[in-house]
């Protein structure tokens, strides 16, 4: 049998933390609890954690700051909890790199459903490059600078991309010659929100094709896979 997923709950309200931990344990998960970011760091240093349930309102370092720094060093999925259920808070949390967002008060069964969904999506993602990934990638004469977030054409002309277009191109370049579903692309670009629909990926692909394809109506780099998604057909190499 496979290893039970290990969930870390970062929540300073002891009653909520205890109740959620008990519920998740009863549903087959291993659970660790932390009251703040420092306690969470100690858990991460000595355990293989599969998902973090992270409250925004925490002592010392708040949840948004924790989420932001975690996404620099890891790909551990994060579900954010907050008593501030406004649209702005939700958007900010997702922009910091959270995979999902649940306002308080919440039904533990809804949290369980979201945990299962996020874990399922993360397991379906193809393997990406390791930490040794070069900061510059090339394909068909194009140059993609990951550190500076810049794209240069074979003629050395800088091509201006929106943040979403750049993130999409990075995801495609990091998984060349692989079919990526729309859900996978949403996850890889951190673009998933409860209101996102699959067509948003198609729109971003269409815009990106107009900037990098010789003939956007007959794309050779970003190919559509029928009933599958998209595949980046170029050979990608480090600069």
Image (cartoon, rainbow, N blue to C red):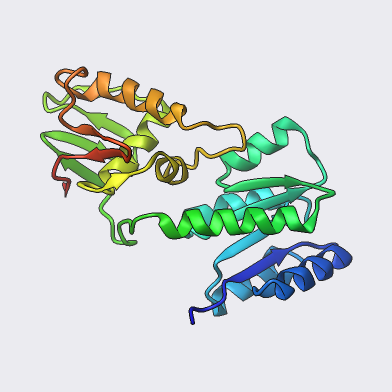
Q: Residue at x 41, y 46 (%)?
A: 184
Does residue 37 appear left or right of residue 198 in this picture?
right
Q: Is residue 146 visible?
A: no
Query: Is residue 14 left or right of 233 when viewed as pictured?
Result: right
What residue occupies the far right of the structure in this picture? 15
Residue at 71%, 37% in the rendered image: 89
| Residue 75 x/y as whole percent | 47, 58
Q: Quadrant of residue 203?
A: top left
Q: Toward the viewer: 142 or 127? A: 127
- Residue 213 falls left or right of residue 145: left
Horizontal and vertical percent for residue 21? Answer: 76, 70
Q: Position of residue 63 (x, y in %)?
A: 69, 52
Q: Is residue 187 visible?
A: yes
- Relative to 30, is 122 above or below? above
Residue 85 vs residue 188: left or right? right
Seen at 77% across and 62% down, the residue is 11
| Furthest residue in direction front, as rendered | 227
Residue 51: x %, y % from top left: 58, 63
How many numbered marks does the figure carry? 0
- Residue drawn 52% across the image and 60% down it: 76
Quadrant of the image occupied by residue 77: bottom right
Q: Quadrant of residue 194?
A: top right
Closer-to-camera residue (23/171): 23
């Amino acid at each position: 049998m496979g290893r039970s997923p290990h969930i870390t709950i970062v929540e300073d309200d002891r009653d909520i933390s205890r109740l959620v931990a008990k519920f998740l344990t009863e549903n087959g998960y291993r659970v660790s609890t932390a009251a703040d970011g420092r306690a969470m760091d100690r858990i991460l240093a000595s355990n293989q954690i599969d998902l973090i349930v992270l409250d925004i309102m925490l002592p010392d370092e708040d949840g948004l700051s924790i989420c932001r720094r975690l996404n620099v060093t890891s790909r551990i999925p994060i579900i954010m909890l907050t008593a501030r259920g406004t649209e702005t808070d939700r958007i900010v949390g997702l922009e910091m790199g959270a995979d999902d967002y649940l306002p308080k008060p919440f039904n533990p069964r809804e949290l369980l459903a979201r945990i299962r969904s996020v874990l399922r999506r993360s397991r379906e993602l193809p393997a990406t490059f390791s930490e040794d990934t070069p900061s510059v990638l090339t394909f068909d004469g194009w140059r993609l600078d990951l550190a500076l977030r810049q794209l240069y054409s074979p003629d050395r002309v800088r091509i201006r991309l929106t943040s979403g277009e750049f993130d999409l191109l990075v995801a495609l370049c990091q998984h060349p010659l692989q079919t990526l579903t729309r859900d996978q692309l949403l996850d890889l670009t951190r673009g998933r929100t409860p209101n996102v629909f699959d067509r948003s990926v198609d729109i971003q692909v269409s815009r990106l094709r107009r900037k990098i394809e010789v003939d956007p109506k007959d794309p050779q780099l970003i190919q559509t896979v029928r009933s599958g998604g998209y595949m980046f057909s170029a050979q990608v190499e480090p600069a």
